[in-house]
Structure formats: C-alpha cells, structure tokens
Image (spheres, helix red, strand yellow):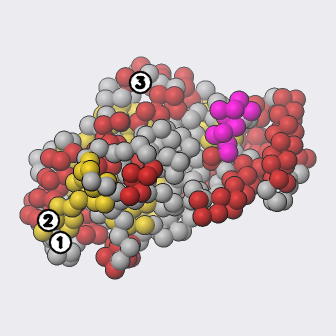
Amino acid sequence: MSVRCVIGVQWGDEGKGKIVDLLAEESDVVVRYQGGGNAGHTVVVGKEKFVLHLIPSGILHGRQCIVGNGVVLEPEQLFAEMAELERKGIRVKGHLLVSDRANVVFPYHKAVDRAGEVKRGITKIGTTGRGIGPCYADKYARSGIRVVDLYDAKLFAERLKTNVEEKNYLLAGMGAETLDYAQILEQYTAYARKLKPFVADTTTIVNDAIDHKKRVLFEAAQGALLDIDHGTYPYVTSSNSDATGLSSGAGVPPGCVRDVIGVAKAYTTRVGSGPFPTELEDGIGERIRQIGHEFGSTTGRPRRTGWFDLVGCRHAIRTSGVTELAITKLDVLDGFDTVRICTGYKVGRKTITTFPADLSSLENAKPIYKDVRGWGATTSARKLVDLPPEARAYLRLLERELNCVVSMVSVGPERRQTVLTGGKL
C-alpha cells in the first residue's frame, strides 16, 4: 500500500503542483482535501503551462482526481478550469469527482470577503477575495450550503434566501452593494445541473481505494505556516493547510498515510500581509523575485521574498509529521556569492529556535543567520552528481538542521528538471 500526502511547509507557493504532478504518475487516485479557488498550482509540461486552482494536478496524467469534502467549491471557477484543460487536450470528464459534502462558494461570500478587507484598511489580511474565509465561516456556523444541498430544491431555495438576506444586511452595513437572491438562485440551479455528473460520495470512493491497496496521493493547498491553527494567525488561510486537515478534509482515518512529503523553496516567499522574519526588502529580495518569477499564480501579486527560515519550516515539519522534503527552485539561487539560512530568532533579549504563537514576537523577531558559500548553475542537473558541491552542502545543511531527508530537488519549472536524491546527499 502506498498512501502519501504532499503539503507545503512554508507560506504557500512552494511548488507543490510540480511535485504532485511528478508523484501522480505513479499514483492511482489524487485527492485535494482543503482550501478553495484561492490556491494556484502551476505545472509546466514542455512549452505548456497549466495553472490549477481546484482540480488536483494528477489530472494531467489522466488519474482519478477527487475534490474532497474539505474543499470549498466555486462552481464557476471549476467549470472555467475544466474548459481550459479540455481546450489544451486534457480530458476531465471520467477523471474528476467532486464530494457531495463539499461546501459551495456563493457570490455573497466573495462580496463579504472584499468588503471586509476594505473595512480592515491597513490591518487587512491580504485575502484573494475569492470568498474562501466567509464560506468556511458559514460552514462552521452550520449555515453553509453543500453540494448535495443543491439537489434538494426546497431546502436550497430556503437556505439560500436566508443567507442572502443575512449577507445583504452585513454588506449594507459596510457600505457595499447588496445582491439579488433570485439571480443567484437561477445561476446556481443551472450550475447544479452542470455539476451533477461529477458529484459523488468521495469519502467511500477514497476509503475503498485505500482498502484495495491502490496508490492514493493527497494534495494540500497553501502552506503549513498559513494553517488556521498552527500558522501565523490571524494572517492565515481558513482551513487546516497542513497534514492535520487530511483526515477531516477527505474522510479517511488519520493513520492511513505512510509518507508526508513537505515541499519548500530553497528560499522563502509570502503573499499578503503578516509577519515574515526573513523578508528581504532590498535589492537581493528583488533579485530573487525577478529570477524566481515570484508573482501569485492566482492574483498576480508580487510575492514577498526572503532567506530560508529553519524555525518556521521545522515547526511545519513537526506538526505535520513530514517524512521527507522536496526542495524547489534551487536554481533561483544560482550565482549568489553567499546564501543565508535563518537558524533562530532574536526577540528582545531572548534567542528562540521554536516558532512562537504570538504575533508580537513574530513581528519583532530578528533573524539569526548562518552564511554558506553560493554555487554555480544547477538548471542542467538531472542526477545528484550533477549538482555543484556547494549546492549539495546547502541541501545537507537543511537535512541536518531539519532532521528530515531531502528526497527531491527541483532545478527548474519543467518536469524533467528534477533531481531524485535517493536520500543520499
């Protein structure tokens, strides 16, 4: 049996899409278990670039792909993504299933999301405006509408009317434009008809696949440091974006996963607001941004850049039980004379090496750096021996400090630009 999970161990955008794409080739089922259309997984195949928001990256290999119950689903975005994949020759029908228990994102969720960010002003979280947080809020307030509810006409109409009235009251109070109930009802009734062939009891399907010893791959969105419980709260996403969300988000037993692959860039990035101890607001940070094309795949926003943070990454590894690491974008650091790694934080007079929960400590943390020698070109490396000695030394340092083996190294966006280490750096 091979049941694996891929998560990000930084603030998202670590390159999970490429790693899932690589592992999907040897998987039977690929399952996305949390997040929504705020995610953006990019996969480059030859000269073709695919940006996936809701559909698991395994679709590019023709695997059975499942959007689990822990995902919040925006139908319009899903249909647009399906149409774009079909346009590029990727068959979706027959390969994609959507959980009947997944909560649905409605226009009022997006409207409340955007209005809330405007109202927060300089304290805004920096959401994508996709309505993810408000949809999860409705889910936990037990007023959400699930996919299965779309097919009970009376229940759907009643619950939608209640929700639209409530959200219009909130929107009016924030000075935002209100929404039309009848228009949303008509729109989503049509969406329900279009979505129906893809709706299934995915909990049973995934558990049956595990019971029958099929190779199942679970895929997280965002990153562990954006986890609602273990991340930099409140500057986080609205779901468990680490491995702890897998069980509830897909409806499987906690102990079913054998391997948890944590994905980290060779440096660190962050989109949106929130503390970022190793952030570089200088020419080096801009150099990394430009070389690494660090602009959000969902929003296009410039990503904040910084050196590798061992403190945050170690926290993510421990809370998710990560068994191996995939280091991406090593090539972005090619040509740097010196590369820095944050080994701890200085907070006031204290030196800490564990990730603090309080926002004040993180916002005032001063990184403690270890400098290592830079390296030459890595983009042509396909085997471990092809990597420059200094690059291998950097990776060994990460292994040692994080107490976790580096099994994969990405040196470019394409599938073939990947080095498998065999655990022997």
Q: Is residue 320 above or below residue 20?
A: above
> Of the residues under marks 2 and 3, which one precedes in the sequence?
3
- Residue at the (56%, 43%) spot, across then down: 238
- Visible residue check, residue 54: yes
- Discs 2, 1 touching: Cβ within 8 Å: yes
The amino acid type, in three-letter code, at marker 3 is: Pro
Residue 392 numbered tag: none
**Residue that carries the numbered disc 2 in the rendered image:** 372
User: Dot 3: within a 10 Å radius of its alpha carbon, few (fewer than 14), some, or many (20 or more) residues?
Assistant: few
**Residue that carries the numbered disc 1 in the rendered image:** 338
Q: Position of residue 332 (x, y in %)?
A: 29, 69
| The N terminus lies in quadrant | top left
Q: Closer to the camera: disc 2 or disc 3?
A: 2
Specify whether 259 is left or right of 229: left
Specify whether 256 is left or right of 89: left
> Of the residues under marks 2 and 1, which one precedes in the sequence?
1
Specify whether 396 is left or right of 268: left
Q: CA distance from mark 2 to mark 3?
A: 39 Å
Q: Nearer the viewer, residue 146 or 399?
A: 399
- Residue at the (83%, 42%) spot, across then down: 166
Q: Position of residue 346 (x, y in %)?
A: 27, 55
The amino acid type, in three-letter code, at marker 2 is: Val
Could you tell me which secondary element the residue under label 3 belongs to?
A: helix
- Residue at the (53%, 68%) spot, across then down: 301
Question: From which residue to which does the magenta span run?
Answer: 134-143
Q: CA distance from mark 2 to mark 1?
A: 6 Å
**Residue that carries the numbered disc 3 in the rendered image:** 254
Is-magenta flag for residue 419? Answer: no
Q: Position of residue 273 (x, y in %)?
A: 51, 60
Could you tell me which secondary element the residue under label 2 belongs to?
A: strand
The amino acid type, in three-letter code, at marker 1 is: Thr
